[in-house]
Image (cartoon, coloured by chain):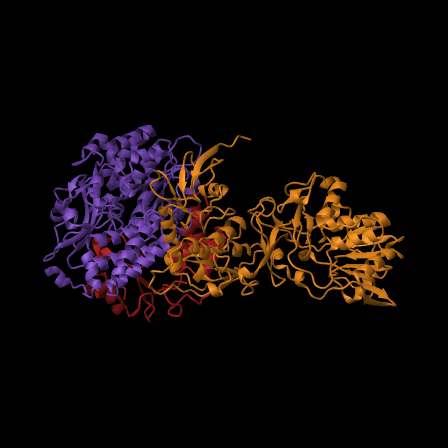
Chain colours: A purple, B orange, C red
Amino acid sequence: MGYPHVPHQKETPVLTKHFGEAEARSLDGWKKRGGYRALEKALGMAPADIVNVIKDSGLRGRGGAGFPTGMKWSFMKPGDGKPHYLCCNADESEPGTFKDREIMRWTPHSLVEGCAIGSYAIGAETCYIYVRGEFTEPLEHMNAAVKEAYAAGILGKNAMGTGKRVDVHVHKGAGAYICGEETALMNSLEGRRGNPRIKPPFPAVSGVFGMPTTINNVETLAAAAPILINGADWYKKMCLSNPKSTGTKLYSVCGNIAKPGTYEVVMGFPFKEFLYDLCGGPLPGRKFKAIIPGGASVPIQTMEEAEATIMDYEGFVAGGSMLGSGGVIVIDDQQSMVGVIARLARFFAHESCAQCTQCREGTAWATKIMERIRDGEGTMEDLDTLLEISENMTGKTICVLSDSCATPIVSGIQKFRSEFEALIHGKKFHPVMAAVA
Amino acid sequence: MAETKMVSLTIEGRAVSVPEGTTILEAAKQVGVLIPHYCYHPGLPVAGVCRMCLVEVEKAPKLAPSCATTVADGQVVHVHSDKSLDARKGVLEMLLINHPLDCPICDQSGECELQDYTFQEGRNDSRYREPKRFNPSEDFGGDIVYVPNRCILCTRCVRFMDDVAHDTVLNVSERGDRAVIGKFEGKDLTNVWAGNVVDLCPVGALLSKDFLNKARAWELDRAASICPNCTQGCNVMIETRENQVVRMRPRPNEEVNAFFMCDYGRLNYRWMNERQRAETPLVKMNGKLVAADWDVAVPAAAKLLTGNRAHIVASPMLSNESLYLLTQLIDTSKGAGVFRVAEGEEVPLPGVEDLALRRDRAANVYGAEMLGFKKTNDVFAGAGKGDVLVVVGEDFDGLDASSISNAGDVILIGPAMPNWIAEKAAVVLPTTNFAEEEGTVTNLRGRVQRFSQAKAAPGLSRPTWLVLGDLLGAIGKQSQFFLPSDVFGKLASSREEFAGLSYDKLGFKGLPVLNAKAGAA
Amino acid sequence: MSTPLAAPGHASHGAHEPYVKVFTGGPRKELDELLTRYPTKMAALLPALWMVQRERGWVSEDGIAEVAEVLELTPAYVKGVVTFYTMYHQHPVGKYFIQVCTTSPCGICGAEDVVKALLKHTGAVELGQTSPDGKFTVIEVECLGACGFATPIMINEEFVESVTADKVPEVLARFA
């Protein structure tokens, strides 16, 4: 929904239903809206049954990778005598993405509830919600919600009077994009540099504090409550396309577009309709040029590709990109693609943790070349070098940050090569001329 | 013990079977395939960050870091396929973009893994057109200087200080291409084990101040030896340039020192180059020491010993061979053998079992004790009037003329010859020092280890074992020995503890004596 | 060794004052409560550093040493962590610390102009430097996660959304 918070009629508000209602932030307000009924129900179920409901619903991770949530939960083996942990990844840092922020800002209890359900389902006594440090307002609401939930006996030793222990703590990050990578988040939570870890071991075997751990995105956990209340079938039916992508998905839309904001639509929604109808199309007098549909790490789409895309996990892949985090960055004809990509490369160079050679050196090198081309100092060989560096940065490192830096560069050169070449041949990018062309 | 499951795979077309859990990198070593790597080191926890050891594993979607990938049955691994080579070439190019091409003035040159792998597999040009990153060099304290421009952030040094030395004084600071190895102001690399980071550093980023600009790696001669500076017996290489010892570095031995040695031992080598010393056999004539031929000096010494009790002061730096020959002299003359040893604080390396800078600061204290020499603070106390005092290999540190007022004739055998003792000596037989001869020493766990000759001795000095053998021959006790291994053979056949041992069997990693004490003291 | 957030010498306060320990009394209690949430002491490192910054305005070498002591870590370790995270100030900053997002989504919506306007109206002149009156330090940051509200800026703990170059004087007026 754009702002102010009026959902478009084609949206399907499930998680966003109470955005804009300040009252929903409080425990009372949340309960009035049916809050914590799902948790109550969950605590009365066997954990394995909850996992099965989530499995049946087809819910997939909303952080970017799209791994089936129920299956992830089922990796946690009960009764191994070790403490289990649930980590909620609220380190939303992918440029273009701000949906989790809105969930935490408007319905913090929905996340507390989701975390409590998830913890119980996987046998974790403790859940840490790792919120990026820059999210001061979401942190305030999350801290307040957790405090209220403890005071009301929803969390703690005797959660909702069931004798079951569920602890949820909010942990504040301190400024590092990479902590959104699950193993980096765990290192950060342990008080280390946010360096991604080599896998295996996978978190379900050895995660935070060396114990079995599940890590889920905010939106994923928040979706658990409505699924438990309404049933797996209800969720599964929210699908306009292929049955592998079910439910609703939040998209945060930003950049050069009439109505930026957070939108919630069912899987399979047509991207063209989404952009032009729900989000109001381009700004007056301008034209869309390119879309980065799933946060800065995914390939750039041309408008031709974007307009033919069906919005689900498979649909975005078919459209030459990925669903990713659902952070839709819209770029119009007033922007230089080289400039946009150079700035993205700088972002990744800034955020590289410095562990892997290709990432530490490659992101910085690629940035320097991109900026040189942007500034009219590039050569045609630079394009070949960029593509080769990108190849060396792809699929060779511990995590995918370096791949993420290479992705917009490669797709940019492939799809908008003429803009690179124009700058190399001494033609300064001119927004007005670009609009005419 | 549960039977270890073996895993069979193929690496570069060679079949290999290794225990379950072995990494591809280690498995490859066993079939003679070196997979280039930087961050991996067998003595450190795996980091998997340099990405240099990427190899192609058939049916795997991505290249695998061989240091962090364990073997699986039926795996087919390609180390030198185009795909793996391209990946490593890519890593090398990235490592070099900000690395200065200052090999001509870099201490690491010639023993630099970046240089070696670039030569082997790297590009022959650079596509980097931007200015290189620059950070000033930093004195890390202790013996270490850090040159960040050369650093490839492999983090071996950080992991060593953290996981092995348990003294986290190094860190990775900052991130991205701004990252450097850092420390905290006022907390220096003064840990006695810190010098190992210089050896661990695969490039010239961490350098020894002691060795700085002293020699190029290719000018060095190297001899496998044992650190003589305490009873641990760390295996080392003694490195010389133009017959001067310029560096000692650890030589891996899982049984003794893993891959490490302490700075006390490492830096305590200057005495091996001492030039103020006995170089010519001397015999006292008319109250004056005069130069003599060995053929004159040895019989002169033998004559003094004949019919007299010998009080033998032996250095615990002497080899088992020399000490064994001295026991013969003791037996013949019904004398006694004693030694003294400098002591210091024991400093363990926490991450390696039973490795420490030991309290007793000499190589062969245990060998000396095993062969019957008595440890004492006052080595001259037992020398009665009329006894011949035979001082062998003693460094005379802290001793002076007053300490030997009791003694009769003095035979001085060794490299060191302070004036006050020379004045009392009837015969001086100049010998080589530890670095100049060959032999074995026995460490505190009873492990017998060989050391080889690293440099030539000055003047007419002869190896201690040779001089002692000749001396025994001159008093009619023992036939001459021509090689230290002959002496060792005789020792092994006459002393039960050494039974069955020989130079061949000892190799350069050593073996324990019979009933050797195992484990921590 | 990277460019410091604020050049020492431009700091108007805090850099040369003697360090007063943070973890006594109330903050110590707060830390003790935090420690109950985690199975290791080390896990309280980020929260403890946040407390130092809250109490002292920045994380000095002395602050690092104190945190290392209370959490049984070494100062070098803590420093490695501090330098990883961009939100810990390693140098004193102005009374109002302004972070402007200039990552691509905001960049294409005019974030550069917002930066210029902020530098002009605060008198801070250059990024990372503190204005002569000690009030403002302006830095560029990477994605603040509010891309739909371009350009978001953070003034200390407060988020201000949808800032444009024109609105800068009005925004700053509240902090004058």
At x 31% / y 31%, what residue is drawn? A51
Q: Nearer the viewer, residue A425 or A136?
A: A425
- Picture coordinates of residue A153 (x, y %)? 34, 37
Q: Nearer the viewer, residue B136 or C140?
A: B136
Q: Which image quarter: residue A201?
A: top left
Left or right of B36 on screen, residue A30: left
Is residue A281 shown left or right of residue A124? Answer: left
Q: Quadrant of the C terminus of chain A?
A: bottom left
Residue at 32% over, 31% down: A43
Can you tell which quarter of the image residue B248 is in? bottom right
User: Which one is in front, A409 or B464?
Assistant: B464
Q: Please give left or right for residue A28 compared with residue A186 in the image.
A: left
B42 vs A243, left or right, is: right
Say whether residue C21 is visible.
no
Say if B98 sits above or below A155 in the image.
Answer: below
Q: Position of residue C173 (x, y in %)?
A: 24, 65
Q: Residue B36 in the image: x percent, y percent?
A: 44, 49
Q: How many marks?
A: 0
Height in image: B96 above or below A128? below
Task: Confirm whether residue B341 shows in the render.
Answer: yes
Q: Residue sitting at 33 percent across and 37 percent down?
A: A116
Percent position (x, y) of residue B466? 75, 54
Residue name at image x 51 percent, y 32 percent:
B4
In the depicted structure, whether residue B336 falls above or below residue B425: above
In the image, farthest residue toward the bottom = C132
